[in-house]
Amino acid sequence: MRDPVLVINCGSSSIKYALVPEDPALPRQSGLAERLGVNDARLKGIDADGREFSQPLHGADHAEAMAVILERLGGPPPAAVGHRIVHGGERFTGATRIDPAVLRAIETTGALAPLHNPANLVGVRATLALFPALPQVAVFDTAFHQSLPPRAYRYALPQHLYAQHGIRRYGFHGSSHAYVSGRVDHLSTRAHGGWLVAHLGNGCSTCAVWQGQSVDTSMGLTPLEGLVMGTRSGDVDPGLHAHLGRQLGWSLERIDTLLNKESGLLGLSGISNDMRRLEQAAAEHHPGAELAIEVFCYRIAKSLAALSCSLPRLDGIVFTGGIGENASAVRARVIEALPHFGLRLSATANAETVGGQEGRIDAGAAGPELWVIPTDEEGQIAFETRQLLSETPA
């Protein structure tokens, strides 16, 4: 399949898209339709000539926005459409061609990802209506982590909650972890070994990868578990919910909002969930910003150290995501908190590897390697879509 694949990532009020050619050297058309359903809805992106554009959508819904996106793309229809689906439960262990039975199965996982899967399905249905004869593929955030062993994915809860209700750790950011771990296998002389990947952005997760397979990860049943994130708390005492209910009379919905939208870097700092803003404020000795960055980095290091227990050997650590790719000071603080791993950071290489640059940032010693690799989730989704369709032609 040599024609481009259209990758769709649909949210409750947005559509992110990219038209991904098979040749990675060719430019991509991409964009974001946001604030769908309200008057100031807008489509922004990069067109076929590499120029930025912005146009109003005037309250368009998802189907109307998809029609505008396709008009902007121009040319013949794509070869296929790859859809990002956040949660695949235990049923979906890899990319899956979409048909009515698959749609129904994705609907059943809605309870596991109520903020994500229903929105993802809106994009699927809108695209199916526009391209009824086009191959369409679901690529799941959770699929890469279906290789976790039971010791990593089971909670210490009664068996029936797992057996009857699927209560277990699933992990997320699978497309990013799959791409980055595959890329470092290609780049490093220690290919197909043991890697720790830190995907750091507004959402954050770590993953231990052994010989190309995820063996443990920081996120769990939902994307809330694990690291401190932009507005998510990450790990807290499970008794916090009961404590806030008893002491403050808060409902579960109020506590859920607190942990997902009011915590993390925003909650600790009191000023922002944006690492760039926090680094500026910390340079001016803002105590909340200083604390937020310190907690953020410590928890990343703590998670990486814990995940190393799942690897027969540690060949290196890879940083990715918006913060992981650009915040050299964050990377340095994380490495500094892991002195017993034999890591040696090159201050020069670390400072220079920002802004989408790819490369090693260690001092070239005999210890584990340190890498910065920009993630490409859209490219990974397109790759898995092509791979599936080449293996299972219509």
Image (spheres, grey):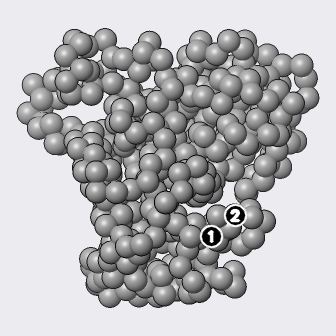
Tag 2 and tag 1, C-beta contact below 8 Å = yes
User: Which residue is found at the position 53% from the left and 79% from the top?
Assistant: 77
- Which mark identifies residue 4? 1
Residue 129 in picture, x, y percent from top left:
33, 75
Chain-order first, disc 2 or disc 1: 1
- Mark 2: secondary structure: loop
Residue 288 visible in the picture: no
Residue 240 visible in the picture: yes
Residue 160 in picture, x, y percent from top left:
19, 16
| Left or right, residue 347 beside residue 89 | right
Which corner quadrant of the image does residue 196 belong to? Answer: top right
| Left or right, residue 336 beside residue 46 | right
Q: What number of labels is visible? A: 2
Few, some or many residues within 10 Å of mark 1 (<14, 14–19, 20+):
many
Up-down: is 63 above or below 386? below
Hey, what amino acid is under mark 1? Pro
Camera-side residue of 85 and 250:
85
- Mark 1: secondary structure: loop
Hey, what amino acid is under mark 2? Glu
| Left or right, residue 350 beside residue 31 | right
- Which residue is tagged 2? 22
Residue 57 in picture, x, y percent from top left:
37, 86
Up-down: is 57 above or below 231? below
